[in-house]
Amino acid sequence: MKKTFEFTGNNFHQGDTQWFSIDKLPDDIKKIEKQFIAASEQSGSFHALFGNYDIYEDKDCFVIDAKEECILNHSLKESLRDKSLNIAEVLPKKDHRHTIVPKGIYIVGIQQRFDPLAGIKKKVID
Amino acid sequence: MITKIDFTPEIKAKIPEYKKRAIEDLYSGKEHDNWKRKDTVEYLEYVYKLGKQKDKPVVIVADNILQYKIFYNLLFNNKMNSKYTKLINLIWFIKNKKKVTKHKLDSELFSELCSELCSELDSELHSELRSELHSELDSELRSELHSELCSELRSELDSELCSELYSELDSELYSELDSELDSELRSELRSELCSELRSELDSELDSELRSELDSELYSELCSELRSELDSELRSELYSELCSELYSELCSELRSELDSELRSELYSELCSELRSELHSELDSVKYNWLFLTTEYTRIYLMWYKFIKDEFLIKCKKEKELDYLYNKINSANISKLFLCKKIVLILRMPKKILRNNIGFHCISNDGAIQYDNQKIHYINGRKISSWIFDKYFNKTLTFNDFVKLENEDEKAGIITLIKGNEGNDAVLTFLGAEIIDKQTIKHTNDYSEGLTLYKTRMSYSFAQNSKGKLNQPLAWIRMVCPSTGAIYLIDTCPLFNDVIECAKFHRPQNIPIELSYLWSSAN
């Protein structure tokens, strides 16, 4: 991703997913199908944004272009039955309360942990 | 030709199904529980058949590693296997229904062997042998056993007698030859030497004395001297020359005979061995025998995937499909292949692993046999005493420090962390607070952060610059939604907890951006 944007300072997090507001879409990013922002390896839960937005993929992060106010849910996969990622609605929570995501552009990534045996940072796994 | 384009996402998506079939039941223990001995035997016999082996091997199956080691020694260790070799040979003969000479076996000997078999067939190996026997024996057992035993005994006696006779004959012939050669040579040499000496003396004395002495004196002296010299010199020279020449001739003869015999024997043996090896190599297809390892199910899985998904024709389709369908139930972990016998170690009862490799932080063991558990953490083998001490609550910090194996040190940290959480690691390692701050993100949301480091450095621990022998460090964070406390591993270079918290944000976020949340859930 080319740094052709500025951080606006409106940042928030839901569990280990962290959101950083930027003023415009970065160059060289690829639009993808809507999908979970993160999914737990053990508990069957997920973080996903519901509503009118576009999602782009870049190395180690997503870029979200929220066209209007959206809802970020942390729920179990069972709660997804008959639900669409296109409709902004609050789902039953798993661990984290839902977050209202204002209209805007965000860089979204997963919190990092440091592996002292490998000497490198890795994504937090839950 | 198959290209990258043919490898569609739909085909790619099927790989996990193939993998699941290959390993799921093995890991869960279902395969172990459903195992039938005949499945292993049938698989091995089929592989031997594909390998163009004329006869079926005797199959011995060990349930666990310890049993495998004992069986191996009883069957293949020269100091321990004499009795079992006989039994294996016997079973092999019966299994392959070998036709042998119809000599009647002495009834006493037969009953003796029978009783020996019965009394001996009670240990684990014997029960294996017994089951191998039972599966093969039919109503004709007695008569066949009778004739087999007879022929076996005969052949054994034959070979024993042969070797005994050979050694006896060898020594006898050698001594006879030696003595004959000795006497012959001696007499030959003696006569030769005598005549030579005589003629030499004659001529020498003749010329010297004749000139100086007159005819009388000459004749007298001559006769005297001749008689004296004859007796003295003759005996002295004779004995000296005799021994020298004898030894020389002997060694010459021996070396000549040796080299001739050697070269003849060598060429004969070479040609024989060559022809035997050639015939064996031509007939046996050893490549099939490699489809009997713990990895075979994976090779066959990829064969099946490639063949079925890309619709590729295969000449050996029937054989490979059979092996693919049977390999899981054969349940082979390791094996020792011989022409007449195969010793097999079964797969473990259960296998536990994570994405990295074998992994289990409970005391059950990552690889479980009935009488043995093997511990792994993140794919690294960990000594059993570490698990024993940890679960007996006797593992100390000194045990940890004394360890030289870095994998085991890391294993202890993971063991404590996985079972008791990061706080227990802090207590175990003796960590201290480096920095503690409260950040006011909004009017109604504040966050408390704490940075911990161990007092000691550890040879296995690195910082973010790759430098080893560092302290271990953690940042303590509290989830605003659940209140759960997280101790997240961090780089030991930080002394300011807010700078440390910035370090833990996603990769693309610059360190200059303030650590502030407008909301947190």
Image: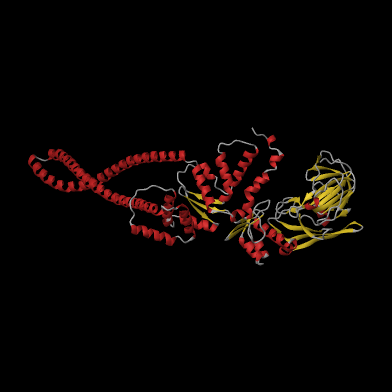
Dividing the picture into quadrants, the one containing residue B11 is top right
Estimate the x, y position of residue B265 in percent, counting from the top left. 35, 41
Left or right, B458 with reference to B433: left
Relative to the observer, which residue lies in front, A35 or B245? Answer: A35
| Residue located at (46% from left, 61% from top) | B122
Dividing the picture into quadrants, the one containing residue A35 is top right
In the rendered view, tell whether residue A32 sits above or below residue B94: above
Estimate the x, y position of residue B200 in percent, counting from the top left. 18, 40
Q: Quadrant of the N terminus of chain B?
A: top right
In the rendered view, tell whether residue B233 sits above or below residue B399: above
Q: Residue furthest top?
A: B1
Dividing the picture into quadrants, the one containing residue B349 is bottom right
Q: Residue furthest front?
A: B139
Relative to the observer, which residue lies in front, B249 or A94? Answer: A94
Relative to the observer, which residue lies in front, B36 or B63? Answer: B36
| Residue located at (28% from left, 42% from top) | B253
Relative to the observer, which residue lies in front, B260 or B302? Answer: B302
| Residue located at (57% from left, 47% from top) | B326
Left or right, B227 with reference to B401: left
Left or right, A69 with reference to A110: right
Estimate the x, y position of residue B323 in percent, counting from the top left. 56, 44
Whether residue B413 appears in this view of the structure is yes
Q: Quadrant of the C terminus of chain B?
A: bottom right
Q: How is the image coloured?
A: secondary structure
Q: Residue furthest left?
A: B216
Whether residue B496 appears in this view of the structure is no
